[in-house]
Amino acid sequence: MSPSAQIYGLMVEFDSPEELLRATAATRRAGYLRMDAYSPYPVDGLSVELGIRGSRLPFVVLIGGILGAATAFFMQIYSMAIDYPLNVGGRPLISWPVFVPITFELLILVAALAAFFGMMYLNGLPCPHHPVFNVDRFCRASQDRFFLCIEATDSKFDRLITAEFLSALTPTGEVMEVPLRSLMGDHA
Amino acid sequence: MENGQLKVWREQEKVPDLLAVPEYIPGGYTASTVSEKISGLVLKRPTGVGWLGGFGLSCLLLAIFGMAVLWLLVFGVGIWGIQIPNCWGFDITNFVWWIGIGHAGTLISAFLLLMHQRWRTSINRIAEAMTIFAVMCAGLFPLLHLGRPWFFYWLLPYPNTMALWPQFRSPLVFDVFAVGTYFTVSLLFWYMGMIPDLATLRDRATSRLPRIAFAALALGWRNSARHWHRYEQAYLLLAGLGTPLVISVHSVVSSDFASSIEPAWHETVFPPYFVAGAIFSGFAMVILLCIPIRHFYRLQEFITIDHLDVMGKLLLATSFLTSYGYLSEQFVSWYGGETAERYVYWWRLFGFEQYASITWFLFFCNTIVPQLLWSRRMRRRVSVLAVVSLLVLVGMWFERYMIITTTLSRDYLPSSWGFFKPTIWDILTFVGSLGIFFTAFLLFARVLPVMSMAETRALLPGAHGPEVGR
């Protein structure tokens, strides 16, 4: 096994979002594809630099909304006109205007559930254990620091060459190795 | 230099700086200090005597609620003052009042997000928490009012041995879906907005229990740019779904009244009029909650006087919308010329032996008092804002009380006229519901971040934050 197989990747830290944006763009230009950036808030333009194209989430939400509305509408028609028809003053059994409020509410409900759970599913969350958490400094990613990680599965990845490339990006501190398993064992 | 001198002169001469850019972003703070300050409120701040006192009082109210509900379950709704023809009394008043309060939360979070109002960032978490707890209180009242609350699940469509369905043509069944959806969506919105902050708390916690608890709640959020990308999309989509939802929920609530044929209920103005009143009372509650939080947690730099100012303006605007509802109602009842309806309105305004004093009191609270907020100086005085908000909340409660009791006690036939007189159990159940709200709210303020750290960081100068929410 090559040494690079034992680590998840190499990580560098930055102080500011500009530096992270610059470094991400440089890394993409150098031909790396499997990488991720970490920031304490969504940084404008970072997804473009990482080459993230649109996502399937709006489509998932659309499907959720259609399913919710259709279920509600046909459930009401089935119950009020087919399964238990009730003649109220000779009014039509499929009195669709009064079915609108519940149809609308279920549209919103299912679409919102699709937005939340779709986001979680597409992001692979919940994910309580992840190699990036093995880096001690990484606890700052949720507070005030910016990180860039090139993953070892990238075809261009080489432990020494990539480390050299990353340190040329003038990060704060050293290039850090991201171990696949926790060394301390306390993150388990 | 010149600016500084100008500022000093203004302060000395008490000249309001009308052209000054409002300060919605804490000056002098960095991403590190924002994280430290807000997470410190949860992780480092010792539990104070004030909090314990407030919590004890809320728990006492909660205990009163428990007792009142137990009494209700044992003896039935007859312990309340409701009696034919007044079958709705405090219970439905409380329901409409609480759910109305709940409306400002999602409005602030969702609507102001879509409108790019950056000032929402400091108060949206508080407002969302308020929404969830208010909707919890609201949901309990119609259930308790059912008579046999343990059969509440009959309201849901499910295959049952009775081969029955809920009456989907009834607004009371619309309510079940509207309130249920509103609660679920508000909870998702609140929780989703909190995930990055829960990750911050996980990473900053020093003791074992909080670290495990926050790690579990943060669901392994690791601030990845790929995750943020979808997170922001989902948040925006939820906001887009939440905005029409807010409007629909109180419209549905109002159709409980408007779709009946009772005099002074059967009106097309009801949906917008109720939505405006809901947002009005909700903003009053947000102001009333923000004032002690910014004081006790020393968050004056985050929830600035400019925040209170802009909320005061919104309170004034929604007061006008609600007052327009009052005027329109009176006008249409006169212009419509329907005898029973004209009579109910006349009697609401001038039947002083029964409800007219309540009507004039609520006009005073909801229309007259908020006029104070035309003055910038008044809007920027915390005590004035607090008193106005409190009166608005009281006034809005009486508004719903007036709408419900007057119509029911003056039906078309004088033979079915009545009068609603609350019993002690009505009052205890209402007061007790404040206990649910404040117990939940105080727990929230103690163990969860009261402000969005991630969104605040993105607003700081030089942050390269996203356009959304600015």
Image (cartoon, coloured by chain):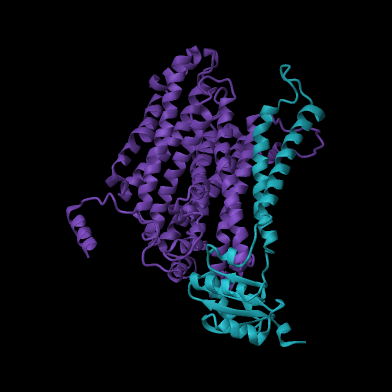
- What percent of the width, then of the height, locates residue B300? 36, 59
Total numbered labels: 0
> Is residue B100 depicted above or below B120 in this figure?
above
Between B301 and B20, the one nearer to me in the picture: B20
Residue ID at (42%, 40%): B393
Residue ID at (41%, 63%): B49
Observer able to see residue B279: yes
Residue ID at (76%, 35%): A74
- What percent of the width, then of the height, locates residue A30? 62, 76
Residue ID at (40%, 36%): B319
Observer able to see residue B424: no
Between A18 and B373, the one nearer to me in the picture: A18
Q: Which chain is cyan?
A: A
- What percent of the width, then of the height, locates residue A158? 68, 84
Q: In which image quadrant can residue A169 be found?
A: bottom right
Q: In which image quadrant can residue B301 be found?
A: bottom left
- What percent of the width, then of the height, locates residue B156? 71, 39
> Is residue B432 depicted above or below A46 in this figure?
above
> Is residue B171 depicted above or below B13 in this figure?
above
Q: Quadrant of the C terminus of chain A?
A: bottom right
Is residue B207 rendered to the left or right of residue A74? left
Q: Which chain is purple?
A: B
Q: In which image quadrant can residue A94 be found?
A: top right
Q: Quadrant of the N terminus of chain A?
A: bottom right
